[in-house]
Image (cartoon, rainbow, N blue to C red):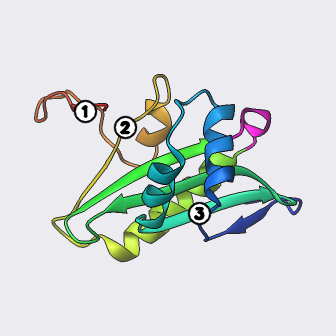
Amino acid sequence: MLPDKYTLKFTCPSVEQFLNLRTKVGWSDLDTNLAQASLNNSLFHATIWLNEQLIGMARVVGDNAMYFYIQDLVVDPDYQKLGLGKVLMSKVEGYLFESAKKGATIGLLSAQGKESFYGHYGYTQRPNELLGHGMCKFI
């Protein structure tokens, strides 16, 4: 449950707010146009605000049919360990429950040490008996 002093919205943050939040958690810099295009092409946004300050967000990207990808679940370090990530993830899961049909795949890349957070929602670590290592390429 979200404490009263915070506001939950299902809107895309501005690119400046998005980039600022990324900086606060130590994520790499992005070109503003690239970040804006990425935000615009998202399927779903959940954001948490304290007054006019973006302090947390999560979004889903993908083809809205077979593949969904949880992206940018991030909370400002000054507001971590307050359950805000759980609020965001519950909203993402609600969206996915409605949107992802049988046969769809939902993926994510967890930050190091955060795997157990996603395990509470039924996500499986790789590798395991059935699946090899997940892979990615950063450009």
Decide if residue 59 is on the left or right side of residue 15.
left
| Mark found first going from the N terminus, 2 or 1 | 2
Query: Magenta segment, which residues?
Result: 75-82
Label 3 CA crowd tier, 10 Å (few <14, some 14–19, many 20+): many
Does the magenta run of residues contain 77? yes
Q: Is residue 78 visible?
A: yes
Quarter of the image with the C terminus in it: top left
| Mark found first going from the N terminus, 1 or 3 | 3
Q: Position of residue 109 (x, y in %)?
A: 37, 37
The amino acid marked with disc number 3 is: Ala
* Residue at image mark 3: 46
Q: Position of residue 68 (x, y in %)?
A: 30, 59
Element class at badge 3? strand
Q: Residue at x 79, y 34 (%)?
A: 78
Decide if residue 23 is on the left or right side of residue 131.
right
- Of 26 and 6, nearer the camera is 26
* Residue at image mark 1: 136
The amino acid marked with disc number 2 is: Leu
Quarter of the image with the N terminus in it: bottom right
Q: Residue at x 64, y 61 (%)?
A: 13
Q: Residue at x 64, y 56 (%)?
A: 87
| Mark found first going from the N terminus, 2 or 3 | 3
* Residue at image mark 2: 109
